[in-house]
Amino acid sequence: MLERLHRRTWTFPVIASVAGAVLAAVLGFLTFGAQATAAPEQVPVAVAAPDTGPLRAAAERVAAQGGGQFAWRLDTSDRARKLLADKEVYGVLELTTGPGGPQATVVLSGAINPSGAQAAQQALTGAGQALTAALTQAVPGTEAAPVRMETVHPASVAGRTAPLALSALAWVGCLAGGAVLTLLAARREWRPGPAVRLLQILGTSVLVTAVLAGFLRLWDASLPLDGPVLGFLALVTLAFAGVQAGLLRLLGIRAMAILGPLYLVAPAVAGQVPELLNPAYRDILWSWTPFRFGTEGLRSLLQGTPGAPDVVTALWVLGGMLAAGLALVLWPRPRRTAESQG
């Protein structure tokens, strides 16, 4: 008896120490690691110039600088702005001829993830300054004009913050609803049937969507809160609540060990554009994390670019998540287990 107690005395601290180390490793990988290893790689940007003339030749030289940190695309101004609206590039450097000589304008979009827009702004501003300086040197008596800045679909602070924040809050709110139902059922030794879980999914979605809409109105009343935005928020909460309910049904409260840490992915990974992430984080986490679909789809709706491809992608992915979650919830248990539900 004493020998067994002695072994436990030494075993428990070892288990606790290993658990602490594992937790630190997981948190470091999911959060700080993504930020510490962030670096631009093939960030898509565009340079626009007239079809002919010295500005076109200068733009072609810029676009020829393939590889490295930025991937340049050469096009006309109209088509480059269309690429920006579709989020195929994060910024456009427009070269035009002004009264005093060559003029460079950096065009950004508030509908672009702020991390991508910031990276594009830095690159395009530097390239614009270098180009206008080189072009004006060939014309005596002229000076390089400062690079102008233009933002289409401008976003307020709340407009830049809300998409990621609401997506993360939707996950936490829906997860809390599913976890409470699971804990209450475990305390009463009762297994909720499909109808009960469906009611929990629907009720949680309605209430969490209302909370998110309230925050959106509180943070910035000028942001649109129309049918498409509310419908998209409802789809996000339904998809999150459905997947969580399905896993909680399969694994019980143990599913929290999977669903809880996923919240940490939101600010660290979904808040970045993939071109700024280390390839390991891009492939292992960013490629599938549900937060990025809700975040970027909502950003497009809030900033007036509902036709962006990421909205359609988000609708398909979130719809698939909802369907998978409902399938897990409605999948019949073996007869022996079903008869013991009571």
Image: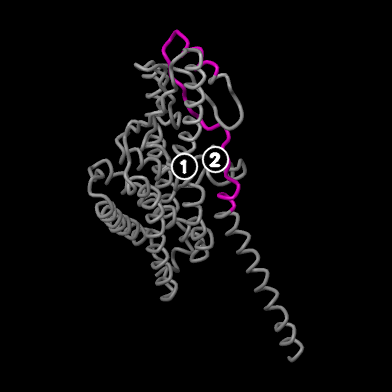
Cα distance between the residues tagged 2 and 1: 8 Å
Locate residue 80, reporting x and y percent: 41, 22
Write the start and end of the magenta stretch as one range: 33-61
Label 2 belongs to which residue?
276
Foreground of the two, 140 or 277: 140
Foreground of the two, 55 or 166: 55
Q: Residues within 10 Å of mark 1 (few under 14, many from 20)?
A: some
Q: Residue furthest bottom?
A: 2
98 to 255, vertically: above or below:
above
Label 1 belongs to which residue?
115
Locate residue 333, reporting x and y percent: 47, 58
Locate residue 140, reporting x and y percent: 47, 13
Secondary element at image label 2 = helix
Q: Are marks 2 and 1 in contact (CB under 8 Å)?
A: yes
Q: Residue furthest top?
A: 52
Q: Which colouring convention does the figure follow? A: one colour
52 to 245, vertically: above or below:
above
Q: How many marks?
A: 2
Q: Label 1 amino acid? A: Ser
Quadrant of the snapshot with the C terminus: bottom left
Return the disc, 2 or 1, that comes first in the chain's sequence.
Answer: 1
Secondary element at image label 1 = helix
Locate residue 66, reporting x and y percent: 59, 23
In-image side of 21 versus 85 (left or right): right
Q: Is residue 309 magenta?
A: no
Q: Label 2 amino acid? A: Leu
